Image (cartoon, rainbow, N blue to C red):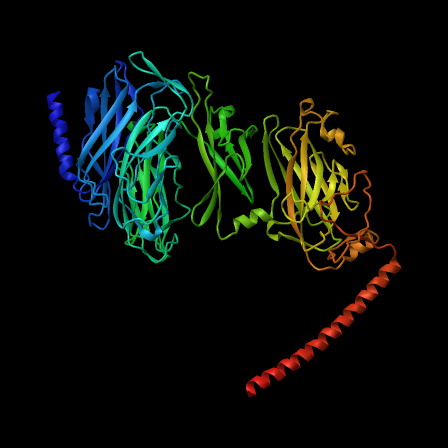
Amino acid sequence: MEAGAVLLLLFALCGFASTQSFYGDSINFKTPHKKADGTFTVTFDHRQNGRDSCVNQSSYTCDGGVCTGFSMSSVLQTDQDSLGQKLWCQSEGQTTATVSTNKTTLSLRAAGCCWVSNVEGKTNWTSHAELDLGTRSDSHALNSCPVTTTVSSLRVPQNCFSRVQLLAHDPDADKVKCRFAEDATVPTNFTLNETTCTLTSTGEIPIGVHVFELMLEDFSTKNLTLTYADGTSATRTASDGAAPLCKVKLQFSMEVLSAISNCAPGNVQPMFLSKTPSHGDILHATAGQKFQLTAEAQASHSSIYDFQVSGPRNMTKVFSDGQNGKAEVTLSWTPDQSDLYRFIPVCFTAETNATQSEMRCVVVMVIQASIIQGKANVKCSPNKMEVAIDKSSMPDIDENFLKLRDPSCSFTSNGTHIMASMSFSTCGTKAEDKGDFLVFKNEINSFELASEIIVRRKTVKIDFSCQFPKTISISSYYNLHKSDYIFTESSFGSFGYTFEIFRDGNFTNKVEASAYPVEVKLLEKVYMGIQAESELPNVTLFVESCKATPDDNPDNTLYYDLIKNGCLQDETVKVYPSNQTVFNFEVQAFKFTGNYDQVYITCSVILCEPGSSFSRCAQGCLTDASRRRRKRELTKETDSHYIIQGPLRFVGQGVPSAAVDDNFNNVVMEKIEKIETPITTAIPPPASSDTKSSGGGGVIREILNTNTSTLIFASAFIVSLVVMAVMVAYFTRKRKAEDRKLLISDWEN
């Protein structure tokens, strides 16, 4: 034991001598392993950052005689600046500690000198980690600690600092909190969000190097029991006052530079592009196979000369630069069997002489080749994505134990594929801004039941996404063309609706998304169609209501009913016969009175199982509102869901000749400015005794009763146009003559 203490002291002395420019460090644990004799082996990686040399690291010691042995592998330098100026470097060493059987906690410490010269005046540094050795009642395994790290040296111009997002991932899905360590000197005007582990500024930040010492702690999100090797146990509650399961200290430095001319990402400061993984992504590497990660950045007004990387030992990087200020790095690493099931943090920044990009961090999980397989085909539509997994590529996978990010959304399957469909705002789909692209992401995971003690199912995790270039106005694109809607209910699974505008009454040639808003003229026929899709066979679509509004807000107080309680309210609505999942109809174009030139159509739709006289679909048109709905328990049907289409935008005031020929005496709906008291002629609805609702506004309806009156009206209108044209021409000539006289007079003066 004395020899071991001397050895640790020598290591500490080496560390003292080699860290005169200490930039920080991090520690990451593998999941502890319980041996047959009751002892534990705990393996951890120690990454240390510096300026001159990072190879000779300080050694950790155990508190309270917990450890009976230490085994430390050789330390390897993992990254250094490519200019050879010894600006920064990082190394990683791996240590395995053997812990005696009667201990409940492992506490590790390291110390050294000296921090890089800094504004806070810190010199000595200490590292610390503490791990609870109890077996969890939820996973029946030992606890895993939060995973974190940083690149060697963070740099940011004084006028461009907004935030630094740190990595804080927990393999057990526990809640991770970040806080300043007890012995830390908190830099001026910095604040830390404990939940997101994000540094932000509260005022002007002094120029110079600042040092940060944070403690990351994980807390269970549910009550659990910890059982120890000596037979004792303890409970952990999900309350805020519970003790953490693990503590790991993260130390790093940040240099605040002089101000630069432009803080826009991609200008002087590099901006990551779409090839680059997002911060916090979980990537997968297979033991014995090469893993690669590519990051691409761009700075149009500076030159990227390198990427700073924090990664595992033996990870290599290949740098290449391109045109228009772009540069790329490819990281390669081949994990071995000893890395199996490790969660390995990787962080990177793009470097220029003046500054660097944001820091992005991901977690690489090392797995067996047989744990995750699957060929997933993704179809990206304007506002939804569909994924289909080839069953033959995933043998022995139980599809009943697969879930999307939102487990309330379900899958469908056939003999060859497992499928899911979702809009970009449902099923846990996340939107991410990746510089030049907007990306929508989701994932498929396997899951276990809380009641299961053992499982023999393979673990599945498949990420899938759709990305769209920012050169297309994505927000406008989606707001203008709303045609696909996906819903999920426990009794009906996943089902969806498409709502389209068609070019003619054949309902086969739909108006393409690029043609929105759809331009129409008054009295022109508008053809619209709703189609339902469901994983259940023989469902029936019922359109309960359709109303028009001047914007895409279905709750607008200004509206006009086309269909209400299943009854047609507008006499120009014509429903075309079709199958039970399709509702095709036409309506003559109209406008709202007032300064409105657009109309949106919102419909309320329901799906029912056929064969029940109690379903809303079977009830059809209800003139008595009290009979409108029965309890849903009596039949299997969905909730009412709103779907919206539009806008229809009005051009010109002419009446199409075809519409006049077919419906000469029909209703003309046109915009009339209200001067004093509006005059309206209402037409009672043919299928309901309910009065039409216009929600505080109104649609003006004027009836053209005879051909003669129409001809007189048209003649008078033409005469008025001629008189108006003559008057405009006269006053225009007069104004030009006056302007010419004024111009000559000014010139002479």
Number of residue marks: 0
Query: Residue 652 versus residue 580: which sits nearer the camera?
Result: 652
Q: Is residue 383 left or right of residue 729?
A: left
Residue at left 41%, top 24%?
239
Q: Quadrant of the C terminus?
A: bottom right
Q: Is residue 456 visible?
A: yes
Query: Residue 500 versus residue 148: which sits nearer the camera?
Result: 148
Q: Is residue 288 visible?
A: no
Residue that extends furthest to the front in the rendered view of this protein:
676
Query: Residue 235 versus residue 40: which sits nearer the camera?
Result: 235
Q: Is residue 567 left or right of residue 2?
A: right
Give residue 121's quadrant in the image.
top left
Q: Is residue 239 left or right of residue 102?
A: right
Residue at left 26%, top 19%?
40
The spot of residue 159 in percent (x, y) is: 34, 53
Give residue 348's quadrant in the image.
top left
The spot of residue 627 in percent (x, y) is: 76, 29
The spot of residue 682 in percent (x, y) is: 81, 48
In the displayed structure, 300 sits above or below 725; it is above
Q: Is residue 557 left or right of residue 191?
A: right
